[in-house]
Image (cartoon, grey):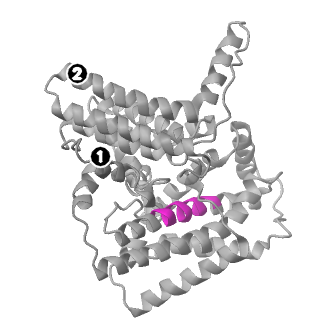
Amino acid sequence: YAWPGWPYLGLIVFSTAVDWQCGARIGACPDKPRRRRLLLVSVAVNLGLLGFFKYRGLVLELVNEALSWVGGPQWAPWLPGLALPVGISFYTFQSLSYTIDVYRGTVAAAPLSRPLRFFAYVALFPQLVAGPIVRYHQLVEQLQDRRIGLDMAAHGAFFFMIGFAKKTLLANQLGVFAAALFEGQDARFLEAWVGLLSYSLQIYYDFSGYSDMAIGLGLLLGLRLPINFNSPYRSRSITEFWQRWHITLSSFLRDYLYIPLGGNRGGRIRTARNLMVTMVLGGLWHGAAWTYVLWGAWHGLWLGIERLIGRRSIGFFLPRPLQCAFTFLVVTLGWLLFESHSVAQAWQFTHTLFVPTDFAFLLGAPHDPRLGFLVLGMGLALVFFAPNTQTFAQRIGLGRALFALVVFALGIEQVLQHGFNPFIYYRF
C-alpha cells in the first residue's frame, strides 16, 4: 500500500484513527447532538479525503465552466500532482459504514483499549484495494476468534486458484480485443461489437476473479468474507442484476444512500427519483468523469422504469432466456459509457454499433480474429451456463481439485510469459 510513497500509508492510518475515535465516542455518548457532531466529523474526514484525492480536478472543471457562463476569468489554482491512493474508494466507505452503524445503534463500538482489532478490520489486505466492501459486524467476531480448519483452507485455496484463472486466462485475453475498441481508432461494426462484448465479459471475469481471490485469501486467514458476485449476467432485469453484481457495493448504496433518501416510500415517482440519485452517485464513486455519471444514470433510468411499470423485468412477457439476453444487452451498452475516455468517444462508438457502414473485421496482426471469437464464445458459454465459483466450490472432489490446479498453473504460465496486468478496479 505504501509503494507509491510512505505518506499514503499514513493516509489510511489517519482515516482509520479518526473513525475509531469517533465510533468509540459516539457509542459512549448519550447526548444526541454531540453524537451527531461526531458522526459529521467522520463523514467530513472520509468524504474530504476522497474528494481531495479523487474529485479535485472535476470540481475545478465545474467551477471554470460556471465562470465561463458568467464571463468571469478562469480559475487555475496550483494543485499537487498526487497519485490516487490505492483502495481509497473502498476503505473510506468501509470505515465510514462503521461510524454510521454505531450512530444508528446497529453495532457496538470498537473498544478504545483494542485499537488493533479495528485497524485490522479496515486494513485487511485481501480486500483492501478492490473489495468486497465488508461491514464491521461481518468481521468483528471473526477477528476475535479465528479458527482455520483443513476444509476451510482447502476452500480458500480453491477460491484463490479459480479467481486467479478467471483473471489470467479469461479477463486478460478478452482485454486484448476490448482494448482494440477503446484504445484503437476507427473501429468497424463487427470490431465494435466484439470489442464491447469482450469488455463486458472482461470486467466480470476481472472483478469477480479478484473477489474470488480475496475470499480465498480470507478463508486461508480464517475469515469468511461476503460473496460479491452471483452470476449477474443471468439476471432477468436490471433490478436483479444489481442484486447479483458487486453485491457489497449495492448493499452499501442501498443502506446508506437509497433508504435514507426515502427508498420506496412515497410512491413510484419518488422511488424512481431516489434510484436515479443513488445510481448517479454510485457512478461518480467510480471516478471523476462524466462517463461514470452517465453510466450511473443509465442504470438509474432502467431501474426507475422497472419500478414505474411495476414489473421486475421490462421484458416480463418474454421467455426467461430472452429476458436474460435483453438485460445483458442493456448492461453491456452501459459498459460503453463506463470504459469510454470521453462522452464524445462513447457517442462515436454508439454510432458505429447501430449505424453499420463497414462489416469488415480487420483487427489483423497481432490479433487473430479467430482467437477473438473463440475466447468470446468461451466467455459467454461460461458466464451463462457454467456454475459460479461458490456453487462450483460446494463439493471439491479430486476432479475439481485437479482442474483448479491445472488452470492455476496455466495462469502462472501466462503471467510469466506476458507479465502482470493490473485489475480493472485497482484504478478506483
Q: Is residue 183 left or right of residue 45?
A: right
Q: Nearer the viewer, residue 108 or 55?
A: 108
- In this view, 413 is above or below 344: below
Circle 1 residues within 10 Å: few <14, some 14–19, many ≥20: some
Circle 2 residues within 10 Å: few <14, some 14–19, many ≥20: few
Q: Main secondary structure of the magenta part?
A: helix
Q: Which residue is mark 1?
A: 115
The x and y percentages for residue 113 are 22, 44
Numbered tag placed on residue 34 in the rendering: 2
Q: Is residue 402 left or right of residue 84?
A: left
| Magenta extent | 199-211
Whether residue 323 appears in this view of the structure is yes
Whether residue 240 appears in this view of the structure is no
Residue beneath the point at 47% across and 35% down: 281
The x and y percentages for residue 346 are 69, 43
The x and y percentages for residue 276 are 44, 34
Q: Nearer the viewer, mark 1 or mark 2?
A: 1
Residue beneath the point at 41% across and 27% down: 44
Secondary structure under the numbered disc 1 in the rendered image:
helix
- Please state which amino acid type lies under the numbered disc 2: Arg
